[in-house]
Amino acid sequence: MTEWTTARVEDRLESAADVFRTLPGVMPQGFFNAWPEYFHSFADKVGQEPQMRRPRPGPRQITEAEEALLWLRWLERDDARIVWLRAERTPWKRICWEMGISRPAANRHWQYGLALITWRLNGRVPPSKRSRRFVVENANNLSRKIVL
């Protein structure tokens, strides 16, 4: 198995957010549409650009997305929220406004969240006596010997 890095974790979380975005919405039981389906004639379609739709995600992509979503359980609530908002490509300004923190603080929470997930995926538990900075700086060096 290959080593996990923070960049690889970030890519996996972003692809999970994309998968969840493309899935159809949840409808209440018994929901239906009583309107008849409108069939466009050829004259209606003349001069229009075809609408391109992305294909629906396959079972493997959905399974990987669900697995990536479970990684957020390892984080504290606020860190998990920031990591997921960044995976959804939410602008930093909106994240800062929603969480009530500054931009550098939001970035530190995001980096720490990715680093913590990386440590756990590589089968290591970050030392509780060390700082968050230590966890972030050593997240990509887990295959090497870390001097505690």
Image (tube, rainbow, N blue to C red):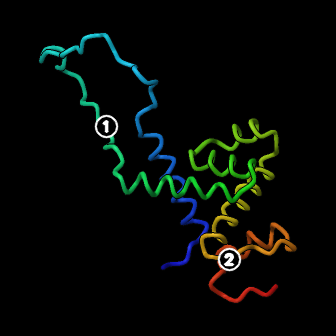
Q: Quadrant of residue 121?
A: bottom right
Give the class, few, some or many, for how many residues have Cα within 10 Å of label 2's Cα (few <14, many ≥20): few
User: In the rendered image, which residue does mark 2 sit on?
Assistant: 124
Which of the two labelled residues, at mark 2 and mark 1, occupies the earlier sequence position? 1
User: In the rendering, at what x and y percent does residue 136 appear?
Assistant: 73, 69
Residue type at the position of mark 2? Arg
Q: Which mark is residue 53?
A: 1
Percent across and percent down for residue 99 are 77, 40
Q: Give residue 40's mark.
A: none
Identify which residue, 105 or 65, lies in the foreground: 65
Q: Residue furthest front?
A: 30
Q: Quadrant of the C terminus?
A: bottom right
Position above or below: 5 against 64? below
123 relative position to 60: left or right: right
Q: Amino acid at mark 1?
A: Arg
Instruction: State the residue in front, 68 or 98.
Output: 68
Residue furthest right as drawn: 129
At a point 23% along the width and 23% down the height, the residue shown is 48
User: Up-down: is 36 above or below 22?
Assistant: above
Distance, label 2 to label 1, CA atoms, is 41 Å
| Residue under the point 62% across and 48% down | 84
